[in-house]
Image (cartoon, helix red, strand yellow):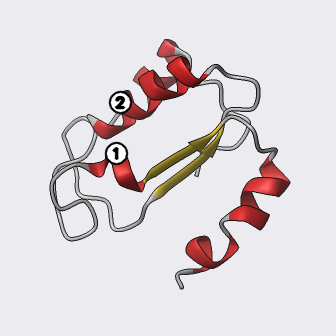
Amino acid sequence: MFLGFAYHAQNMLLLRPFEEFASSRPIYGTALGMSDSDVTIAKGELRSWFMPNDIFPSDPIESIHIENQLTCAKLFDNYAKSIAGG
């Protein structure tokens, strides 16, 4: 979960894992005010961190939800059941 995170290159480098890893959960994040094209770039960078697994069978991009129209509170409202696990 990325809340209030700007996805700047320096921050992404600090968070990037040393190796690709398999995530057991989808990714959710806010990007309020960020352009759609910049969200696509951020999602692509996050996608490169993961290897295929049961949750991300071939392309993890479908399980990465970066929202540029939602505040943190609205993100929780919008994805309440998904975040809770069902």
Residue holding disc 2:
44
Counting from the top left corner in percent of width and height, residue 27 is at 48, 53
- Tag 1: amino acid: Ile
Say what secondary structure mark 1 lies in: helix
From the viewer's perspective, is 79 left or right of 8?
right
Query: How many dots with numbers?
Result: 2
Say what secondary structure mark 2 lies in: helix
Q: Who's the residue at 67% across and 32% down the image? A: 31
**In the depicted view, which residue is nearer to us: 79 or 49?**
79
Q: Who's the residue at 24% across and 35% down the image? A: 18
Answer with mark 1 or mark 2, whichever residue precedes in sequence: 2
Counting from the top left corner in percent of width and height, residue 21 is at 22, 51
65 shown above or below 77:
above
Counting from the top left corner in percent of width and height, residue 66 is at 57, 42
Q: Please, which residue is most extreme toward the top here?
A: 9
- Tag 2: amino acid: Gly
Cα gap from disc 1 to disc 2, whole angstroms: 7 Å
Q: Who's the residue at 74% across and 36% down the image? A: 4
From the viewer's perspective, is 55 left or right of 84?
left
Return the mark for residue 61.
1
Answer with the quarter of the image where residue 48 lies. Answer: top left
Return the mark for residue 49.
none
Q: Are marks 1 and 2 in contact (CB under 8 Å)?
A: yes
Counting from the top left corner in percent of width and height, residue 52 is at 16, 55
User: Which quadrant: the C terminus?
Assistant: bottom right
From the viewer's perspective, is 57 left or right of 4?
left
Badge 2: few (under 14), some or many (20 or more) residues near its Cα, within 10 Å?
some
Q: Who's the residue at 61% across and 45% down the image? A: 29
Answer with the quarter of the image where residue 68 lies. Answer: top right
Badge 1: few (under 14), some or many (20 or more) residues near its Cα, within 10 Å?
some
